[in-house]
Image (tube, grey):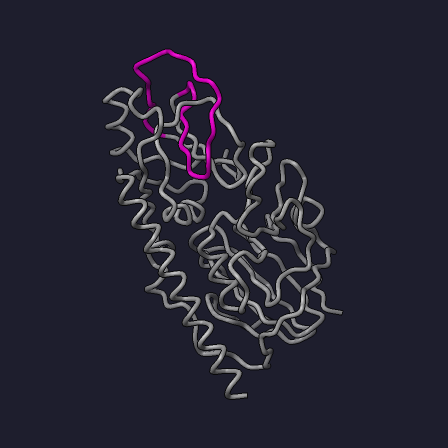
Amino acid sequence: MNAIHVIHSGLLTTIQDLGRWGFQKDGVSVSGAMDSFASRIANFLVGNEAHEATLEVTMLGPTLRFEKDALIAICGGDFSCTLNDEQVSLWKPLFVKSGSVLSIGACRNGYRAYIAFAGGLDIPLIMNSRSTYLQAQIGGLHGRALRKGDMLLLRSSDRPIFPHRVNWGIAVSARVYIYGKKRTIRVTEGIEYATFTNESIHYFFTSPYKITTQSDRMGYRLQGQVLERNTEQEMVSEAVTFGTIQVPKDGQPIILMADRQTTGGYPRIAQVISVDLPILAQARPGDVIQFQKAKFEEAQQLYIEREREMNRWKTIIDQKWREIRGAN
């Protein structure tokens, strides 16, 4: 049977792809991988398209037993990872023999990792996505996180599965910006940016903010300098997105994340730029972040460069697999 048994579920392991787009008008969150960079690269390494569902691991990973040979890749934070009690590396393809046990331990740096399976997980599409939306209990495996005793089915893959290690993967230099220990988050001005006092704007960009324990896939609550507005005017709820930074009445910012609500009624001081969302996704409660102002044009250019980089990686990886097929 082409199955994987969950021996231990980890702290929070969910099935996520790149999101459930097109349903925010109906009040359904996009959800999807918190760190789309790691999820996409993991899929590329096993020959999948970027949108295939992966297992998103948070802080402490699962233990999985494979009932059939499989090709996987694990990307993301610096997790301890063993296959049959032997240490294995992240950010490269990994061949797993039937009967093997994969154990992902605690994260030493970062917060999340993504496990991709060649062919993808055999999970039904709900509103064009396999992502788990925990609040609404839809998608993924019964709309919830994995539990001990669960069984995951895999779809077939055209990637060759050979019982040996490969000697290539994603270089550290290509990912150190995201997975280093520096947590500088670039933002553009939010819609209500000009309604905040000059002093608050100064604090926002010069003072550190700590991620509190009241943080999850829906949003990160921050603690730091209180931010104040120069108007008492109430807001009507308006659209928000991944990385929108709202400021409620207590003056402490909230960054909306993958499972965010579709609208919000708090003033939006800033918006995290797309390429820095993975940095934010790898920050954990207790980490300190610093905001840095960016222009909208700069954010656009950085996004274009990131997408070109992703396309280059996919091309290089596909060529590596062609070479393996040719040699065997």
Query: Which quadrant holds residue 228?
Result: top left
Position above or below: 37 against 156? above
Placement of the C terminus among the 4 image quadrants: bottom right
User: Residue at image x 43%, y 52%?
Assistant: 110
| Residue displayed at 54% across by 32% down | 261
Q: Is residue 301 magenta?
A: no
Q: Nearer the viewer, residue 62 or 106?
A: 62
Side (left or right) of 112 relative to 229: right
Residue that protrudes farthest toward the bottom in the picture = 327
Figure quadrant of residue 176: bottom left
* Magenta residue span: 224-250
**Residue 143 spot, x, y in % from top left:** 68, 44
- At x 52% / y 56%, what residue is drawn? 106
**Image location of residue 74, percent across then percent down:** 52, 63
Q: Is residue 235 magenta?
A: yes
Closer to us: 56 or 181 = 56
- How far from the left and from the top, in percent, is residue 269? 35, 28
Residue 155 to residue 12: above or below: below
